[in-house]
Amino acid sequence: MAYVLSVYRRLAGLSLCLAVLAAAGCTNHAGAPASLGDLPAHYQGTLPCADCAGIDYSLLLSAHHIYVLREHYDSDRPVGDVIETGRWRVRDDVNQLQLTPSDTDARFTSLWRIDGHDKLTALDEHGQPIDSDADYALKRTAGPTQHDLAGPRWMLADAPDRPGGSPAYIRFHKDANRVTGSTGCNRLTARYQQNNAQLHVEHAATTRRACPDQADTEQALGEALRRTRHFETLGAFLLLYGTESDPSPLAVFRAA
């Protein structure tokens, strides 16, 4: 899956626009920075934008140093939400949270000042306060509602095909270890085996309807399911991963 540009690129451009080891339900554990308080955590806020009314940020941090950032542009033009995933770390020496997107390198890490357990404030690329009277803060909200793997209809968050096609989704049925869903064109069925955060999807099959406009989504979804070895749920998001050595998710889904 192709994922979106990092938060750093967007923050740097505000002058123009101004592995995973456990499943859901985890709380803070040994080794998690005390400066952030209990994890998982959820932060929200609206940051300024030069050509829109503002950008609504929703940031989820897991206890396993994974994050999901959703951005919603408040604009008269229809703009889809931007979903970014990656790894986070805390630099206690400078009291900073660093977010590094999984599809880029450390050059595009975004920096946030940790203002206690309840507030994060965006910094510039040098780790300095942004020279503006605007509010660049995200406030901590009630802990994210965690979803089990089985039950929700998981909608593919970043389909590679053009917008407007039928939504691609999957659903895990615990009673029969069965997966059902849609590739955006064809119905999908498979079997799955789960052991804590380990996940294998097997014997995937689809109907054979031809949908050229959804071919990329269908291929990408099938490949992601075939390669999945473990997963993490974080709030309303499901992230599928391959080998332990690859920190980038194969696919990201959002609970319907």
Image (cartoon, rainbow, N blue to C red):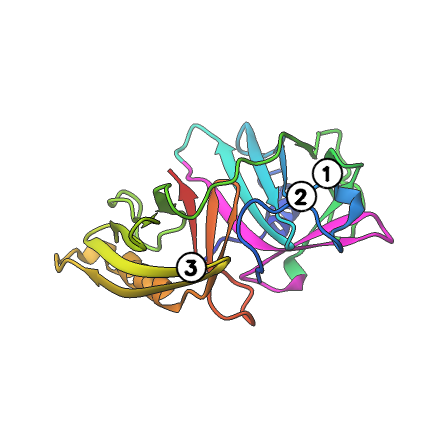
* Residue 136, image x, y percentages: 70, 34
State if disc 3 and disc 2 touch (CB < 8 Å).
no
* Residue 171, image x, y percentages: 32, 47
Mark 2 or mark 3: which is in front?
3
In the depicted view, which residue is nearer to us: 175 or 219? 175
Local SS, label 1 = strand
Left/right placement of residue 46 relative to residue 147 reads right
Three-letter code, disc 3? Gln
The reply to whether the magenta stretch includes residue 97 is yes
Residue at image coords 53%, 61%: 103
**First reached walking from the N terminus: tag 2 or tag 3:** 2
Three-letter code, disc 1? Leu
Label 3 to label 1: alpha-carbon separation = 35 Å
On the rendered image, what quadrant is the N terminus found in?
bottom left
Mark 2 or mark 1: which is in front?
2
Label 2 to label 3: alpha-carbon separation = 24 Å
On the rendered image, what quadrant is the C terminus found in?
top left
Residue at image coords 83%, 47%: 95
Q: Which residues are magenta?
A: 79-106
Q: On residue 120, which mark appears?
A: 1
Can residue 1 be seen? no
Q: On residue 194, which mark appears?
A: 3
Above-or-below relation of 227 to 94: below
Left/right placement of residue 65 relative to residue 81 reads right
* Residue 26, image x, y percentages: 61, 47
Above-or-below relation of 240 to 149: below
Location of mark 2 (residue): 39
In the depicted view, which residue is nearer to us: 42 or 32? 32
The reply to whether the magenta stretch includes residue 159 is no
State if disc 1 and disc 3 touch (CB < 8 Å).
no
**Total numbered labels placed on residues in the image:** 3
